[in-house]
Image (cartoon, rainbow, N blue to C red):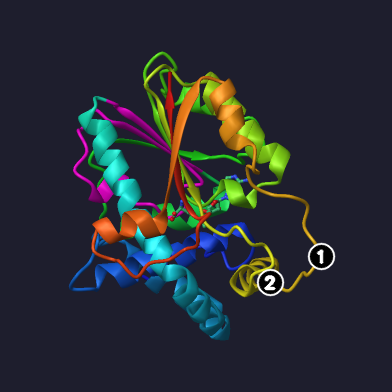
Amino acid sequence: MTEAAVPVPVAGVAMTAIGIAVVRARETERDDRLYSDPFAHLFVDAAKPSYGARWDELTPLLDMFYPARTVSVRLVDDRVEAAVRQGIRQIVILGAGLDTRAFRMDLPADTRFFELDLPETFAFKEPVLTRGGATPRCERHVLPVDLCGDWAEALLAQGLRAQEPTLWVDEGVLGYLLRPDAQQVVATLTELSAPRSRFDIGSFAVDPNSGAYLALRRLVSGGDETPRAAAGLGPYIEKWLHEHGWDTSFQTWAEQAAAIGRPDTDGGPETGNMVAIRR
Ligand SMILES: C[S@@+](CC[C@H](N)C(=O)[O-])C[C@H]1O[C@@H](n2cnc3c(N)ncnc32)[C@H](O)[C@@H]1O
């Protein structure tokens, strides 16, 4: 009997997660790898046939994004480990895509690990993981939600404890949301964040007119060139966070990459990650 076909996201923003799985698969094959994601190639192998010739459009784009993007995966891993060392036992990955940290990292079994993404992402992700025999190493909760809607109730219903500190991770999702939606996500998670909570915000494409960014947009939108309204958190997010009970610090990818053995990484002076800690 043949296996049922897995629905592969070949259009829309959910397909960007496949690009990042390619990044993690590529890193995993290196002798000097920064991390190992043994599941990344399962997603790549499952997705590739559905793309046909379009797969070749994805590869040069990934060459441009790869150096900073792969460094960011390792840095988020490090921050997940640090949060766990500090006693944090709930982690929320916003726009989790094909993230497999709940399976590949040595997390305490009582860690509550929440993955939020669109339903089409999990319609692809879950069967691929099941067929690959993947077993989570902690309490994993999958939430097929639109971050532009009301997701807080679902998160609380799945077991998030707002009175305990949480590590929130934005690794390449809020930049895709229109500005009011992205800012609302931060307002919502602020309400759910007890003191000592942490919020890791990755900043990737800052120039919406750069060649790489435009090519990515064309690929995701299927060729639609309509100018887009302002997206992402915007320039005043740091001020907003300060005013709403968070202390923040920012480091570029380049600064941090040197320390983990990738001194040539340069994502530009405004790309890096902000770490916010709830007072
Ligand atoms: C570039 S991928 C990053 C995925 C993952 N964080 C990683 O680093 O591998 C962006 C992800 O954001 C998700 N996403 C975009 N808009 C979303 C929305 N409105 N609600 C939920 N997820 C969304 C996409 O489906 C996709 O999985």
Instruction: Tell me the residue at 30%/40% (across/down).
Output: 80
According to the image, label 1 marks what residue? 226
- Front residue of 271 and 71: 271
In the picture, the quarter occupied by the C terminus is top left
**Quadrant of the rendered structure where residue 51 is?**
bottom right
Assess whether residue 93 is covered by the magenta stretch. Answer: yes
Dot 1 amino acid type: Thr
130 over 21 or under it: above or below: above
Mark 2, residues whose alpha carbon is within 10 Å: few (<14), some, or many (≥20)? some
Place of residue 231 in the rendered image (x, y in percent of width and height, measured from the top left): 69, 49
Q: Earlier in the sequence, mark 1 or mark 2?
A: 2
Q: Tell me, yes or no, if residue 75 can be seen here.
A: yes
279 over 202 or under it: above or below: above
Assess whether residue 260 is covered by the magenta stretch. Answer: no
Q: Tell me, yes or no, if residue 5 can be seen here.
A: no
Q: Indicate left or right for 177 with 194 as reference.
A: right
Place of residue 106 in the rendered image (x, y in percent of width and height, measured from the top left): 19, 43
| Marking on residue 278 | none
In magenta, the rendered stretch is: 88-116
According to the image, label 2 marks what residue? 218
SS class of the residue under badge 2?
A: helix
